[in-house]
Image (tube, rainbow, N blue to C red):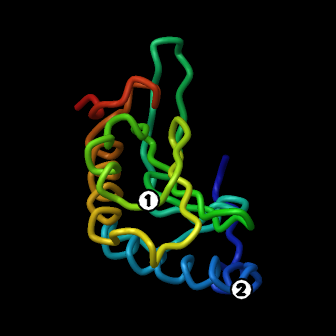
Amino acid sequence: MQPTGGDVEAFIAQVAPAKRRRDAETLVAVMRDVTGHEPVLWGTIIGFGTYHYRYESGREGDAGAAGFAPRKAATTIYLPDGVAAHQDALERLGPHTTGLVCVYIKDLEAVDLDVLRGVIADSYRSATAGVYTQRAREGGPAAS
C-alpha cells in the first residue's frame, strides 16, 4: 500500500461515530509527537513515517512505521513489529483486543494513554531501526 495523498483533516472530519473522531484527533497528536512525522493517508489508514522490510522469501517493500484507522466498531492501531513484542505493556493498557499486528480500542479515554504512547514509540523505534526482516508474528527489532 502506498500513501494516497488525501486530506487527513477532511478524512477525520467524516469519521463516525463522534467518539471515534475524537480518538482519531488524539491519536494524530500522539503519533505526531512520538514519531516526529506528519500524518499521511494510506487509503483509510493514517500513517506516520515509513520503514523498509525485507523477508527471507525475498519479498520487500515500504510500509507505514506507525498508524491507525478509525473504524466504526473500534480504532485499529497498527504495530509493525506485532503485538506479541508488547505483551507486557498491553496487559497494563486497559480495555482492548488484539490481532497479529493490531490493537483494537473502542474508547481511547478508557485506556492508559501513557502506556499506549510507550507501545507506539517502542514499535516505531523497532520498525525504523534498520531494514526490518521479521514478520510481525516473529516480532523483534529491525536488522541494522
The residue tagged 2 is 10
* Image location (x, y in percent) of residue 70: 65, 68
Q: Nearer the viewer, residue 67 or 99?
A: 99
Q: Is residue 5 above or below residue 66?
A: below
Q: How many other residues sit within 10 Å of disc 2, few (<14), some (14-19) or many (≥20)?
A: few
Q: Nearer the viewer, residue 25 or 127?
A: 25
Which element is circle 1 on? strand
Comparing labels 1 and 2, the label whose residue is closer to the camera: 2
Say which residue appears at 50% left-offset and 51% top-offset: 103
Asked which secondary structure carries label 2, the reply is helix
Q: Position of residue 100 (x, y in %)?
A: 52, 35
Residue situated in front as seen by the camera: 125 or 94:
94
**x and y, in percent, of residue 88 in the image:** 26, 43
Residue pictured at 32% horizontal, 37% vertical: 85
Q: Which residue is mark 1?
A: 49
Which label number is shown at residue 128? Answer: none
Q: Is residue 134 left or right of residue 75?
A: left
Amino acid type at circle 2 is Ala
